[in-house]
Image (cartoon, coloured by chain):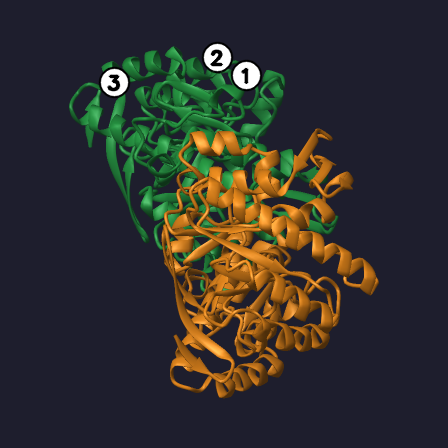
Chain colours: A green, B orange
Amino acid sequence: MHRDGAARRGKIFLPHGEIDTPQFMPVGTAASVKAIAPDDLYKMDAQVVLGNTYHLLLRPGPEVIAQMGGLHRFMSWDRCILTDSGGFQVYSLAEKRKISEEGAVFQSHLDGSRQELTPERATQIQVQLDSDILMAFDECPPSESPHVYHQHSLERTTRWAVRCKAEWERLGGKGALFGIVQGGLYKDLREAHSAQIAALDLPGNALGGFSVGEEPERMWEGVEHAAPLLPADKPRYLMGVGTPEDLLRCSLAGIDLFDCVLPTRTARNGLLFTKRGRLQIKAARYARDQRPADEECSCYTCRTFSRAYLRHLFAARELLSFRLNSIHNLTFFLELMRALREAIEGGEAKAFADRMLASFAAGPD
Amino acid sequence: MHRDGAARRGKIFLPHGEIDTPQFMPVGTAASVKAIAPDDLYKMDAQVVLGNTYHLLLRPGPEVIAQMGGLHRFMSWDRCILTDSGGFQVYSLAEKRKISEEGAVFQSHLDGSRQELTPERATQIQVQLDSDILMAFDECPPSESPHVYHQHSLERTTRWAVRCKAEWERLGGKGALFGIVQGGLYKDLREAHSAQIAALDLPGNALGGFSVGEEPERMWEGVEHAAPLLPADKPRYLMGVGTPEDLLRCSLAGIDLFDCVLPTRTARNGLLFTKRGRLQIKAARYARDQRPADEECSCYTCRTFSRAYLRHLFAARELLSFRLNSIHNLTFFLELMRALREAIEGGEAKAFADRMLASFAAGPD
């Protein structure tokens, strides 16, 4: 592993391949990165995608996926997959949820069916999916919850992590189980919980409960404090983050893995990330603009189509718009991380990040 | 040109390439074959796509496309493009239309703006789009209209075709202007109108007004009668047709070109065409089906994904479903025509068609 300040340039070895870090993971919630097929993902050199246990539990169900040979074969993706534990979606999507020491009982947001997720069940499902990185089942309280609520919650999250580890080992210990540190923006709680989770000696660790509504500056500060608390010799994953600015700043703070729906979700809304900041493709000024979305980008979209055409597709609500915009945004995120890894290797991480942040702020032509 | 009975195996030479006939043309209404990018079209060896003058007139406008270098450059498709004249959509989509000898005045179905299409304007737009095959501006009456209505209408369509030809020649005569024969299911009118349109000696001719609601058997019978009335030494295009059964039967009747939204529209509704008939991918029996949609198909979708996965994508309303299903259906239509061309070359067109029709009727496993 190369180090450059707190930033780290590493490699994670997993059943379905290697991950160069820092790395961004496209989100494939329901066994599909929205509007994007594996052929596109291979071309942009994605190394790992994320699947959501909550969504796959409800549809098509882990038994179906297991019978089809696991999530990789089901979605025809032969590189790495990280699955979350479903915990976060139980809090954000499910209806009539009840949390107890045992786990969570809730109603499916799709059909109202009664569902249960416990540390054991969440682990079993991720084993059925054949994940490369499995996440411990945790509770993610709203960041504005009081200190005492966070404290009780993360103590339970630790007890749940112990149960996840036991179940994962019982089932063969394939892949890498990551623990999750919570604690919101309370530094004392982050410190206490990091120690508890680190003591479990899991293959990797994650920060949960960031980027859940707080200002970016507070998040960056929280991550700068919390990242070094995680074991230095294991991968560190910042869950659900973030913008290009977040990725740069938090990589400098020592984070190795990121995931976020941002590049694909904004793509579907016509927002394109470029080296010179964000571009709203629906803007009238692009109607006759022959240039690619990002003149420095080598993705299929930028090599092939003009801003004028992308604007037309978006205005006409053409389905192709979703794929082309998503290819570009994902390529942008992955390429940003590739360049950052190179900068870390060269000992120029901070200079690279400063240059990119200034460039983003300049705004598109 | 090879002949096998009435069936013809030909080649059309156009500014942007050659078209092997009989050929199916994917429909790219608004400068995009829905959910499909040019990379997919090249892989399935599409030779020509259709653009809709009516839609492109309203959005983004022919001036924008001309300024971007024409429709090929705008949509990054360097093979052939056929554009219709907009006539059919004026009747089927536009609001408050008024038809006169001069042409059609109507309101845009998008924003209510006042628009005008005349034979001259429709031709000018298609020249601005840089089409390889331009269609004459015609009136397409409902097939159930009385004989006398059809008769007056097609006499005007002939006068409009004369004006289209004059305008096309005035603008340089690039590409190939096709005349359109109307007449509904009235054989005497088809005969009279074919003679009028043939007399214009245009580079190609089309049959309009079929597959507008009549039973397939009546359409096939009408085309069997009408196709041989068109000049034998020029391409014959059957507009807006059709199903795989239609393509086989009407190719046997001497048709060279087809277009239809059917493969892409049904794909978006989860209907997949296979050598063993139609497959409704949402059916519960495919939930754990490891087989490809069509075991004899070599498209990306069938080489890569199971019925179980395609069913899941459709059920979860994943955007990828539209692309994968469309790739398969278009490949199926294009491959059917390729095999038919081979059969015509071998003098086995009828036997091939009979075999395929029997296979379609067998139904999927």
Q: Quadrant of residue A227?
A: top left
Give the residue drawn at x 70%, y 47%. Answer: A110
User: Which residue appears farthest toward the left when viewing the image?
Assistant: A346
Give the residue drawn at x 53%, y 49%. Answer: B165
Residue type highlighted by circle 2: Arg
Q: Could you tell me residue B80's position as x and y percent? A: 41, 52
Residues indicated by labels 1 and 2 sit on the same polypeptide chain: yes
- Quarter holding the N terminus of chain B is bottom left
Secondary structure at badge 1 equals loop
| Camera-side mark, 2 or 3 | 3
Between the residue at mark 3 and the residue at mark 1, the CA separation in whole angstroms equals 26 Å
Secondary structure at badge 2 equals helix
Compared with A28, A272 (above or below) is above
Q: Could you tell me residue A178's position as x and y percent? A: 41, 40
Determine if residue B145 is in view: no
Q: Which residue is mark 1?
A: A214
Left or right side of B52 for A335:
left
Left or right side of B47 for B258:
right
Residue contact between numbered discs 1 and 2, judged by CB atoms under 8 Å: yes
Query: Dot 3: within a 10 Å radius of its alpha carbon, few (fewer than 14), some, or many (20 or more) residues?
Result: some
Q: Could you tell me residue A98's position as x and y percent? A: 71, 39
Between the residue at mark 2 and the residue at mark 3, the CA separation in whole angstroms equals 22 Å
Circle on res. A352: 3
Q: Which residue is mark 2?
A: A218
Nearer to us in this view, A151 or B4: B4
Determine if residue A346 is in view: yes
Give the residue drawn at x 44%, y 20%. Answer: A278
Q: Could you tell me residue A125's position as x and y percent? A: 52, 53
Residue type highlighted by circle 1: Glu
Compared with A290, B228 (above or below) is below
User: Which residue appears farthest toward the front when viewing the image?
Assistant: B199
